[in-house]
Image (cartoon, rainbow, N blue to C red):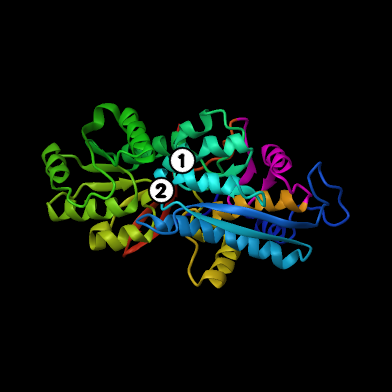
Amino acid sequence: MRFSVKTGAPLLAMALALTACGTSGGDDDEASGGGGEAGTCEDVALGFFGALTGSNANLGINIRNGAQLAVDQFNEENADCQVTLEEYDSQGDPNQATGLATQAIGDDTVIGIVGPAFSGESETAGPIFSEAGLPTITASATNPALSENGWDTFHRILGNDDSQGPAASAYISDVLQSEGVFVVDDATAYGKGLADIVTEDLADAVVGEDTIQTGQTDFSATVTAIRSSGADAVFFGGYYPEAGLLVQQLRGGGVDATFVAPDGVNDPGFIEAAGDAAEGAILTCPCLPPEGNQEFADAYQEAFDTAPKTYSAEAYDAANVFLEGILDGNTDRESLLEWVNDYEGDGITKSVAFGESGEVENVAVFAFKVENGEIVSDREIETD
């Protein structure tokens, strides 16, 4: 079935107004204890931290564009408070995260980060941002352990894998009614973390497990193991470059098991890599389906000549949390962090409020399906 949005999006017009105008306050509002006068600012920047180049660049570009749209709309409506978006291209590589995070905290104009985009780089950069008091809101890093490190600066605007993993398991067991599942992970903090949750949830239904590596291109051993297991479903924890090649080789090896993968695969790059073999794949995501918010989708299309994709709307919401705070006079890291910690407001993806650990309180997970060469919405996944 086609999906119709159940949460978050009904207040679209108001959310877009907030994007343009910041908070409901304006030049006459008093600053909320921040470092600048409400409605005015100078030398203020947000940062985007994630992959803009490299094999996983599509996901990072989706996020950067969502944040950039929010900043551009804000600047158009606030001549006295112009905000720039600094880009930190990590290529999704944790090894680059230390240098980039150090660069970001060394720039005093950067008072908030949309990101980091990936769980591995978040593990590396998180302590650095925490030490510097630089608030972050990730639109995509879903490893649950990230909010368990005591970093007051960490915030996540979508559900973590403790929601996505059980949702994927529920889809496999309840919708697909699979009797045998083979679980594969890519050895990353994100991919293995999700695969472990699915393995634990499905328990006796798991007929085999394997681990591949990022950048790997030959999956013949994994294909043989899956074929020998007799699995009728395959869950892959990882990202779209490897997922596309894996499913292509599965189909070439005579394996027709339903392919299920998480948000890191929910990108057209998966179809580009897999070709016709992607057809019928199920992709999960704790993110708003692109068609769920038409006004946002139209604005994004006009700005970037492409439709919004996975995480674009979440990044838009994340940037707007910061921008509302800046317009309210919070123009230093300390006051903006306090603003984010206490934030409550309606975004285009959900009503946004962060718990004590930085997790967003309103969570939903959706299933998507590759159909006729496109990723289309399937349903919201109900879990116990």
Q: Residues within 10 Å of mark 1 (few under 14, many from 20)?
A: many
Q: Quadrant of residue 79?
A: bottom right
Eyeballing the image, is 263 above or below 278?
Answer: above
On-image quarter of the N terminus = bottom left
Residue at the (59%, 43%) spot, across then down: 136
Q: Which mark is residue 263?
A: 2
Which residue is labeled 1 in the image? 142
Image spot of residue 307 (x, y percent): 48, 66
The structure residue drawn at horizontal position 55% and vertical position 48%, both measured from the top left corner, is: 103
Badge 2: residue crowd in 10 Å (few <14, some 14–19, many ≥20): many
Please give the label number shown on residue 173.
none
Work out whether residue 286 can be spotted: no
Instruction: Name the side, left or right, on which 13 lies relative to 139.
Output: right
Position of the C terminus, as image quadrant, is top left
Q: Quadrant of residue 235?
A: top left
Is 345 magenta? The answer is: yes
Give the magenta part as a residue range: 328-356
Would residue 197 be seen by someone viewing this image from the given angle? yes
Residue 61: x percent and y percent? 47, 59
In the image: residue 333, left or right of residue 269: right
Q: Nearer the viewer, mark 2 or mark 1?
A: 1
- CB atoms of marks 2 and 1 within 8 Å: yes
